[in-house]
Amino acid sequence: MSVLAKRVLEMAPSATLGMSQRSREMQERGIDVISLSVGEPDFNTPEVIKQAGIEAINNNFTHYPPVPGYMDLRKAICAKLTRDNKLTYSPNQIIVSNGGKHAIINVLLAMINPGDEVIIPAPCWVSYPEMVKFVEGTPILVHAGIEDDFKITPEKLEAAITPKTKLLIFNSPSNPTGMVYSREELKAIADVLAKHPDVYVLSDEIYEYIVFESKFESLAQFEEIKARVIIMNGVSKGYAMTGWRIGYIAAPAEIASACNKIQGQMTSAASSIAQKAAVAALMQDPTKSEDLKNMVATFRKRRDMMIEKLREIPGFKVNVPTGAFYIFPNIEGLIGKKFNGKEIACGDDLANFLLDEGHVALVGGDSFGDPHSIRISYATSEDKLMESARRIKEAVAKLA
């Protein structure tokens, strides 16, 4: 009998972190690997936010904060939701956690009983299904392909709902596809949910500020379902604050209270210093932030450049993502091809092949719920992106 718990033995490791580790090991051996696997902006935290963190230290905000977060931060989150999303919340509905992952697992621990079904549109972020399984729920993946721009239809959602359905995990802009749902598409999803009053929604809006042609819209805007929507967001992506580890939920008071109880027993509050920096971040109006505008414009330029290069590679089918900083090419045209006797049977196989032969690290689509795709993060310099595209094309040419 293993000393480890069944829940750990059955949990799949994070594919994104695994690929990052493998590429680092190769780099340590002196191999020039370009990493396109990490979901992290390659920008530094803006100076005004860093200064707020420094001031927090100087002002001795170095003691235990309240478990749900400092009141000024929770009020700043409420003000942000009003300013940016036209949504009204009170501080008792806000829980600040140690990053977005922590916020999500709090919600799942608070809501999901063994056997409860959780609908997850796929392709999806790698951790959603594993977190659901960890709390003994049943993940139900609803698939949408590249021909649908990786967006589920209301009909597919309706067909997936059963008497056991407790929650829908929804993510727009999407990791891994970069797709953004329009208001009309969200309204159609909300209309389905309105017919099922026992189904709640966890809306992951962490990439809210990184949108290009489209406009970000929240599922919580629809009054008929707002009381059942839990918003998860944070400062990591839009403010380039990944290492500060601040995520939060805006939720019905009962769920927020439950998450507060769980967090109080498990981890207590998020870093006091990071919370004070997050206040400064959230006070920045995104429509006036030059740092944000520059980051989004840079990502859009990189996206366009990579799409052009990837479409030149035989076997790649690429759509145009409208948010985040990912491209999710369909690689069905390469399935069955071989190199040195090894066959490409799925996206993971191609990712490993490209790392070995092209020295480019990206992530296979298998763990995202789509084994016929790969995820490319373009959160790196233009020079590296150009060189990575050249290497990928050269490596793929070796397949026969």
Image (tube, rainbow, N blue to C red):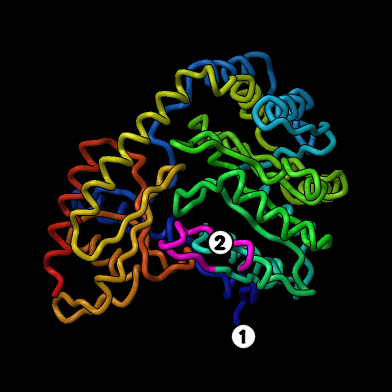
What residue range appears in magenta? 143-155
**Residue 68 location (% of width, % of height):** 78, 37
Relative to 394, is 304 above or below?
A: above
Task: Give the distance between the C-alpha atoms of the residues marked 2 and 1, in whole angstroms.
Answer: 42 Å
**Residue 167 location (% of width, % of height):** 73, 61
The tally of labels here is 2
Question: Counting residues from the N terminus, which is met first, the one under dot 2 or under dot 1?
Answer: 1
Residue highlighted by disc 1: 1
Q: Which mark is residue 152?
A: 2
Q: Residues within 10 Å of mark 2 (few under 14, many from 20)?
A: many
Image quadrant of residue 92?
A: top right
Question: 94 and 374: which one is in front?
Answer: 374
Relative to 193, is 73 above or below?
A: above
Q: Amino acid at mark 1?
A: Met
**Residue 166 location (% of width, % of height):** 76, 65
Question: 344 and 35: which one is in front?
Answer: 344
Left or right, residue 39 beside residue 314: right
Q: Is residue 152 magenta?
A: yes
